């Protein structure tokens, strides 16, 4: 065995199923893959998904109080990868480009992925700030719909091919996300060529860091302290819209 950096902990725990988390707020809809999604209680049935606040879907879930968990068959792996790499903040029609269609959920005021192999509809019961780069949404399961490939004993893997996320390659060279299923592995190009949108998002993050450093310099404080001050200010500003 060899020691690796602790930042790779989540890769060590892969492969894992990667559902699409979808949400709706008014007329606005969004969807993104979230591999850090799992059940945390069977009685009552609770599902947890961890999402970064920078994600547009985060706001839709937090302000609406609902989300859905959608499992796709491996035949749609390219579409799933694409909507994870490209942010709707910079490419408004990303779902259309990926071939993903959202339709009304059955029992919650939200949306689900049309043609999904399974759908779990949830009402947010708690949001947990874990002190890291993702927040945990705990959802009370309201409804579960599955395809004929599912039985009381689990999935028939002879017919249902789940999407399993393995990890990704890094620069230099093309960035490739790696997905697997029963007996098959494919490599999907990062953002499927839409580098401008990816770079625009990266630049937005850099600008935010520059603002923090500028304020830290003016205040004569450590940039990390200023970042927490701004985070607290943002949370206070939005707290009225985040009530669950």
Image (cartoon, rainbow, N blue to C red):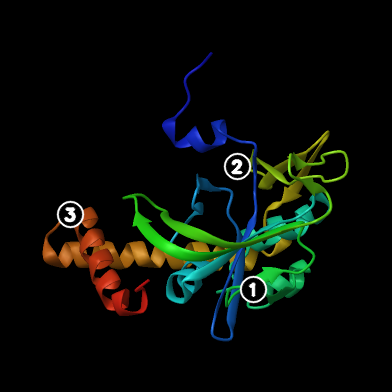
The answer to whether residue 49 shows anywhere in this view is yes
Q: Secondary structure at mark 1?
A: strand
Taking the spot 50% from the left edge, 62% from the top edge, the residue there is 202
Q: Which residue is mark 2?
A: 170
Q: Position of residue 205 (x, y in %)?
A: 43, 63
Nearer to us: label 3 or label 1: 1
Distance CA(mark 3)–CA(mark 2) = 30 Å
Q: Which residue is mark 1?
A: 111
Q: Which mark is residue 222?
A: 3
Q: Earlier in the sequence, mark 3 or mark 1?
A: 1
Say whether residue 57 is left or right of residue 7: right
Say whether residue 132 is left or right of residue 1: left
| Quarter of image, res 53 | bottom left
Say whether residue 134 is left or right of residue 213: right
Q: Position of residue 104 (x, y in %)?
A: 68, 77
Q: Secondary structure at mark 2?
A: loop
Q: Nearer the viewer, residue 147 or 204?
A: 147
Q: Earlier in the sequence, mark 2 or mark 1?
A: 1
Q: Earlier in the sequence, mark 3 or mark 2?
A: 2
Quadrant location, the C terminus: bottom left
Taking the spot 74% from the left edge, 39% from the top edge, the residue there is 153
| Quarter of image, res 224 | bottom left
- The answer to whether residue 134 is above or below residue 28 is above
Asked if disc 2 and disc 1 are in contact, CB closer than 8 Å, the reply is: no
Q: Position of residue 239 (x, y in %)?
A: 30, 74
- The residue furthest right is 159
Asked if disc 3 and disc 2 are in contact, CB closer than 8 Å, the reply is: no
Taking the spot 65% from the left edge, 54% from the top edge, the residue there is 19
């Amino acid at each position: 065995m060899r020691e690796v950096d602790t930042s790779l902990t989540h890769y060590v725990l892969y492969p894992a199923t990667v559902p699409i988390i979808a949400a709706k707020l008014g007329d606005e809809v969004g969807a993104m893959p979230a591999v850090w999604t799992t059940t945390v209680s069977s009685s009552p049935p609770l599902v947890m998904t961890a999402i970064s606040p920078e994600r547009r879907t985060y706001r839709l879930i937090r302000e609406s109080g609902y989300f859905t968990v959608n499992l796709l068959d491996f035949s749609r792996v390219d579409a799933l990868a694409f909507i994870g790499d490209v942010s709707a903040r910079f490419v408004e029609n990303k779902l259309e480009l990926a071939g993903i269609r959202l339709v009304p959920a059955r029992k919650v005021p939200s949306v689900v992925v049309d043609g999904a192999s399974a759908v779990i509809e949830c009402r947010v019961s708690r949001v947990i700030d874990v002190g890291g780069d993702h927040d945990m949404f705990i959802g009370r399961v309201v409804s579960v719909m599955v395809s004929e490939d599912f039985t009381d004993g689990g999935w028939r893997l002879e017919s249902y091919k789940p999407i399993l996320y393995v990890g990704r390659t890094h620069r230099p060279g093309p960035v490739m996300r790696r997905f697997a299923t029963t007996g098959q592995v494919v490599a999907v190009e990062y953002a499927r060529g839409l580098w401008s949108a990816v770079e625009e998002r990266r630049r937005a993050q850099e600008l935010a860091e520059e603002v923090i450093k500028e304020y830290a310099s003016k205040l004569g404080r450590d940039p990390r302290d200023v970042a927490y001050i701004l985070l607290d200010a943002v949370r206070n500003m939005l707290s009225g819209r985040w009530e669950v």
